[in-house]
Amino acid sequence: MPSAALFYLAVYLAKRFYMGQIQAKIWLTFAGILLTLLAMTFLSRGLPNSKEVFYTEVYAGVIVAGVWFYKLKPAEQQAEILID
């Protein structure tokens, strides 16, 4: 759960600092990969073995795919939706 909260914080910061959509997705890609590596390293209590590396790559790949395929709405558009 801490990784999800930290990723949510990364999304919030991307929206807060009015990054362009591509910049925000690059930022979230790096954040997702870093959080995945940190979580998997913590869970394996050290450097992961080859099987754990495979699962780490798959998990990070799903996060990266989600970042690039999800339509992130700009903060201005989000505010308009809340006002309406």
Image: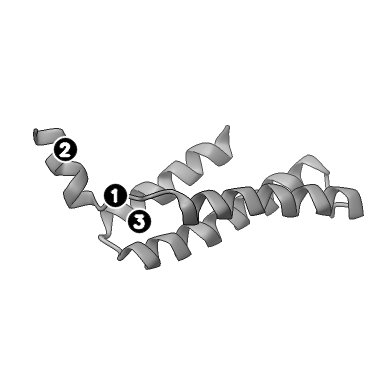
Q: Does residue 11 appear anywhere in the picture?
A: yes
Q: CA distance from mark 3 to mark 2?
A: 18 Å
* Residue 31: percent from left, percent from top: 53, 56
Label annotation for residue 81: 2
Mark 1 lies on residue:
73
| Side of 72 relative to 16 (left or right) | right
* Residue for point 52% across, 48% down: 66
Label annotation for residue 14: 3
Q: Dot 2 surroundings within 10 Å: few (below 14), some, or many (20 or more)?
A: few
* Residue for point 56% across, 36% down: 2
Residue type of the residue flagged with mark 2: Ile
Q: CA distance from mark 1 to mark 3?
A: 11 Å
Q: Indicate the quadrant containing the C terminus: top left, top right, bottom left or bottom right.
A: top left
* Residue 44: percent from left, percent from top: 83, 43
Quadrant of res 42: top right
Q: Are marks 1 and 2 in contact (CB under 8 Å)?
A: yes
Query: Which is nearer the N-term, disc 1 or disc 2?
Result: 1
Q: Indicate the quadrant containing the N terminus: top left, top right, bottom left or bottom right.
A: top right
Residue type of the residue flagged with mark 3: Ala
